Structures are given as structure tokens and as C-alpha cells.
Image: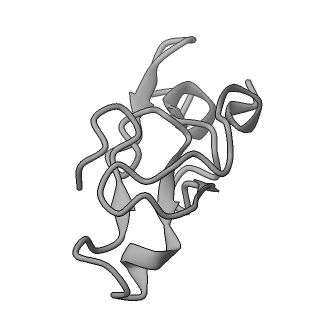
Amino acid sequence: MDVDDERTEGEDCPRCGGWQDWETCWNCGGEGGRDLYEESPIEYPPGAWRTCDNCKGEGGYLVCYACARGESTGAGRLDSSTGSE
């Protein structure tokens, strides 16, 4: 699944109205989690999956660059579902 196809880049930031971009999660590489069976087929059954703690299974997150640079009242990464940190 390519999460980038499901997100609209350039959406307005709910905090400052600035431009934001979709950034692929550094922890899971955009997969949304890990296939545990692939990592250890002896310990886990086929289909065992662990959701990424960093992106909560989204594969990435929206980043407001104005907030991240401290140019507005907010700061940094936004939760894509709620618009909050």
C-alpha cells in the first residue's frame, strides 16, 4: 500500500494555516508496521503484524514546516487524523 497516494500534500496546517507535507515514517519505512513472521518465522505465525508505534500504522505523518521551524505558534509533526501533536 502506498500511503502517499491517499494523502493530499500541501494541505493547510490546522494550527497556523501554513503548508504541510506528507513525510514517510522513518521507523517503518512507510509500511505502517512490521511483518513479524518475516522477521522470525519460528516465533510468529504467518500474518503476524506489529503496528508501528511512531506513525500508529499510517505509514507517515503530515509535517508543517512553518511549525517545525518555530515560525508559528505550533511545533512540528501533526497527527494526521486529529491535526494535533
Identify which residue is drawn at 24% across, 49% down: 84
**Image location (x, y in percent) of residue 46:** 57, 11
Q: Going by the image, does 24 lie left or right of 57? A: right
Identify which residue is drawn at 39% across, 32% down: 51
* Residue 59: quarter of image: top right
Could you tell me how many numbered marks the image carries? Answer: 0
Identify which residue is drawn at 27% across, 35% down: 82
Quarter of the image containing the C terminus? bottom left
Identify which residue is drawn at 57% across, 45% down: 11
**Image location (x, y in percent) of residue 54:** 36, 52
Does residue 47 lie above or below 81 as drawn?
above
Q: Nearer the viewer, residue 73 or 80?
A: 73
**Image location (x, y in percent) of residue 19:** 57, 61
**Image location (x, y in percent) of residue 36:** 50, 31
Q: Going by the image, does 1 lie left or right of 15? A: right
| Color scheme of the displayed model | one colour
Name the outermost residue toward the front: 17
Quarter of the image containing the N terminus? top right
* Residue 15: quarter of image: bottom left
* Residue 43: quarter of image: top left
Does residue 65 lie above or below 14 as drawn?
below
